[in-house]
Image (spheres, coloured by chain):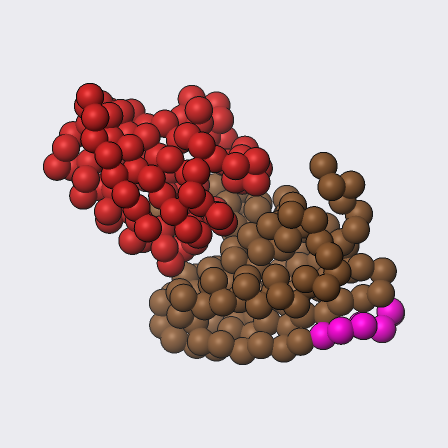
Amino acid sequence: MVETDYTNHILTAYIRGEIDHDSAARIRVEVDGAAQSLRPRLLRLDFGGVSFMDSSGIGLVMGRCRQMQLLGGTVRVVNYSDNLRRIFVLSGLEGLGVLA
Amino acid sequence: MKQAVNEMKLRFPSKSCNEAFARGAVSAFIMHLDPTVNELSDLKTAVSEAVTNCIVHGYRRQSGMIFLDGKIFDDGRVLLKIRDKGCGIEDVAQAMQPLFTTAADEERAGLGFAVMQSFCDKVRVKSAPGKGTTVTLEKRLGADDGA
């Protein structure tokens, strides 16, 4: 469900499948585990493989922003489809510069 | 009141894995209406939010049954009723406020009702503390120009 890559202080988490309340809990554990051990400057959340997302995806991104703030890094959300953008827009995440 | 041209009733326990089941079932139910990608995604997302609310808030992670009734009318209207017999909502107007959540520590964004309202034509919420909550989602398919 999540594959990670760490290069030049950038941790990229490639998220695949559907993000709902059920799967978000598992994705969160995997991403936080990698971030805490690697302490990247930037966490890139790659949504290219995400076929469905409800507001749990927004909670997931906001939670990772808080987590990375504690670790002294930032978050970027990349490769999301038009459909996902319509959900992100509702969250106000656009104004925070988190969305690529 | 128009006669429904098709209908279905589902009941399933409040397990997280049934969030995917519920939206998959609704997607199959409306498929013959030939929905656009956006229409399909809108209804799946709204159903996912409503069912998650039953699990996280209605039953507060205790087990209980969730009831999902679907109807399709000949003008392309889809009506979905998602009901739990959980704790109910004290203040429905407050619960529907964007960003309001009682489960912030679980990383709930407080946007469930905002998503439902944004992706459906009508959202009705009926709730009684101690008795449960019914959310009715209505969306007319075919109104979308496909953009």
Colour assigned to chain A in the rendering is red
Question: Which residues, given as a range, are shown in magenta?
Answer: B1-7
Residue A80 vs B122, above or below: the answer is above
Tell me where residue B11 sits by quadrant. Answer: bottom right
Percent coordinates x, y for residue B27 in the rendering: 61, 62
Residue under the point 24% across and 47% down: A30
Q: Can residue A85 be seen in this view?
A: yes
Tell me where residue A33 sits by quadrant. Answer: top left
Query: Is residue B126 one of those drawn in magenta?
Result: no
Q: Can residue B126 be seen in this view?
A: no
**Horizontal relation, residue B110 to residue A43: left or right:** right
Percent coordinates x, y for residue B12 in the rendering: 49, 76
**Image quarter in which the N terminus of chain B is found:** bottom right
Percent coordinates x, y for residue A67 in the rendering: 25, 35
Residue under the point 67% across and 76% down: B8
Colour assigned to chain B in the rendering is brown
Residue under the point 76% across and 44% down: B144
**Horizontal relation, residue B33 to residue B52: left or right:** right
